[in-house]
Image: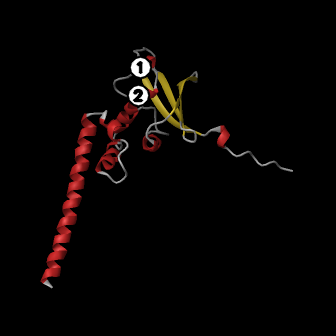
């Protein structure tokens, strides 16, 4: 009986140590995410259930984390967009998840400035959908005249035709 109690205590200690280790690793990655915005791009493809993935989810709960997610897709946009301008520019990013295409437009004139066939991490698109789509206009401190909005669009060619009535 004493041996069983000892084994049970050992199992609890091992389980507790594993949980503490996981939390320590998650906090380690979270610290790196907060200190280095580029770190998000390096770990975005980590498998589900890893401490890095848990840290990303925690980081994106903050406004700074959402800014880092926008910074992570900076290469989607043409360089001229980030030149200093006096007037505020509203950049709308339409994600077509069926064809994995990113359409970028400037508003209010709705001028299409880029179409990108996205070949990056599918999880990164999922993060954008979960944390940026449908929210307010995002502003990143280093680009004070730009406002970003993210939206989902559906390809016309993926919709089923409407039934014809007789």
Where is residue 115 drawn, in percent x and y? 54, 28
| Nearest-to-viewer mark from 1 and 2 | 2
Residue 123 seen in the current view: yes
Q: Which residue is located at x 42 percent, y 14 percent? A: 86
> Where residue 82 is drawn, which disc sits there?
1
Q: How many marks?
A: 2
Where is residue 72 drawn, in percent x and y? 38, 33
Q: Nearer the viewer, residue 77 or 117?
A: 117
> Where residue 74 is drawn, which disc sits there?
2
Where is residue 119 drawn, in percent x and y? 48, 36
Q: Which residue is located at x 41 percent, y 19 percent? A: 82
Precedes in sequence: disc 1 or disc 2: 2
Residue 63 seen in the current view: no
Q: Are marks 1 and 2 in contact (CB under 8 Å)?
A: yes
Q: Which residue is located at x 19 percent, y 65 percent? A: 14
Q: Nearer the viewer, residue 39 or 139?
A: 39
């Amino acid at each position: 009986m004493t041996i069983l109690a000892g084994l049970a205590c050992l199992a609890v200690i091992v389980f507790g140590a594993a949980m503490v280790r996981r939390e320590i690793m998650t906090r380690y990655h979270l610290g790196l995410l907060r200190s280095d915005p580029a770190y998000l791009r390096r770990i975005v493809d980590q498998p589900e259930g890893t401490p890095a993935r848990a840290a990303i989810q925690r980081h994106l709960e903050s406004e700074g984390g959402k800014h880092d997610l926008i910074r992570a897709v900076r290469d989607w946009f043409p360089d001229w967009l980030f030149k200093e301008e006096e007037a505020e520019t509203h950049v709308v990013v339409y994600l077509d998840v069926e064809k994995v295409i990113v359409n970028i437009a400037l508003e209010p004139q709705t001028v299409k400035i880029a179409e990108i066939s996205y070949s990056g991490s599918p999880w990164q698109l999922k993060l954008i959908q979960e944390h940026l789509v449908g929210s307010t206009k995002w502003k990143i401190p280093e680009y004070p005249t730009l406002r970003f909005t993210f939206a989902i669009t559906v390809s016309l060619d993926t919709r089923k035709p409407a039934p014809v009535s007789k």
